[in-house]
Amino acid sequence: MLRIDRYLLREMLVPLLVGLGTFVVMITGHMLFTVVDRVVEHGVGLPSVAKFVALQVPYAMLLSLPASALLASSLALNRMASENELTALRAGGAGFWRILRPVLLVGLGASLVALVLAATVVPAANHAAATMLEHMVAQRPTLAFQPGKFTHTEAGWDFFAERVDRAQGRLGDLFIFQRRPREAPLLFHAAEASFSEWGLTTGPASFYTLSPSGVRDWGELERLRVNLGALAFMPGILSKNVNDLSFSELWAEYQEKESAGRGGGRRYAVELHWRISLAFACLAFTLLALPVTLSFARGQSLLGVLATLLLVFVYYVVMLWLRMVTEGGALPPVVGAWIENGVIMVAAGVGLWRQR
């Protein structure tokens, strides 16, 4: 590797690591914030919280790598352009495409790291985090209940409590909806319920049912006991969620669902293409960073860096919208997942050709 390559790589390495660390902290902090109130209130130990946060890091890295690669390329190229180092390199005989080589190396390296994360590391970490959270809920069942919100299970029982007293282990104004495969569903209501070591016990409760023929029935119970240990509070824990599947598992599920009926494997195809596309966004962004940054690099201006960061923000917003549209069936998975990268690559190619 020539000296020019080592110099450019050093310029990009520090902002790449700093940007990656910053974005990972922000994303994992947001993920922790969504569960911290329930976790802290129930005295979950610091080691368990630390392990849960650590399991969020691979997914946060996958989301952060494209933006970090873009930030590293933009900052390095902006500094070198504003201080006329790129001009000096080109005057010394280094061609435009020769200067671009280490930038491409950073983008390709980031894409390969993101691809490995997306293929195996992130699914395994997601499943481990979800399983860990399920175990926390099993040991402290009030973690699964939020006042004024539904708590769904995989066993056909859904809960809705107006009040949750975690300190006393009590629920107030509780509604329980039981789905039964070959019978009419049941709705239970109790003014109070409390947790025990093995389950949930209500006070006096009323039940209501509506048969398919329209006949309504109701009655009263002295108490109702629900064995919470038999319920799965988080769908996808007992059987892996689509986010917990590796590339090979996604492909196998896609083929199986498609053989059963055309279009049945769409959600697996969307997930597979989305992960791969997100990984290769690192390369697309580093290619785009050079023409955009050089277009604004005058004096000590950071407009080029700000422009690229604005582009990556727009990319993520549009990416989420395209994913929702694709999952709804409006676009083929290949088109929905790759159209943004295609547009970025075309724009980067045009910009590089004009800057050559």
Image (cartoon, rainbow, N blue to C red):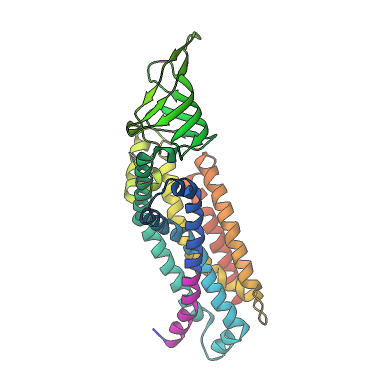
Residue 3 rendering spot, x and y as whole percentages: 43, 87
12 to 348, vertically: above or below: below
Q: Nearer the viewer, residue 258 or 321?
A: 321
Q: Is residue 235 visible?
A: no
Q: Nearer the viewer, residue 295 or 218?
A: 218
Seen in the image, is 232 located left or right of residue 304? left
Magenta stretch: dominant secondary structure: helix
Magenta-drawn stretch contains 77: no
Q: How many marks?
A: 0
Residue at 52% from the left image edge and 35% from the top image edge: 149
Residue at 54% from the left image edge and 78% from the top image edge: 76
Instruction: Report the quarter where the N terminus lies.
Output: bottom left
Residue 240 rendering spot, x and y as whole percentages: 35, 42
Magenta-drawn stretch contains 6: yes
User: Which quadrant would residue 252 be assigned to in this image?
Assistant: top left
Q: Residue furthest bottom?
A: 92
38 to 118, vertically: above or below: above
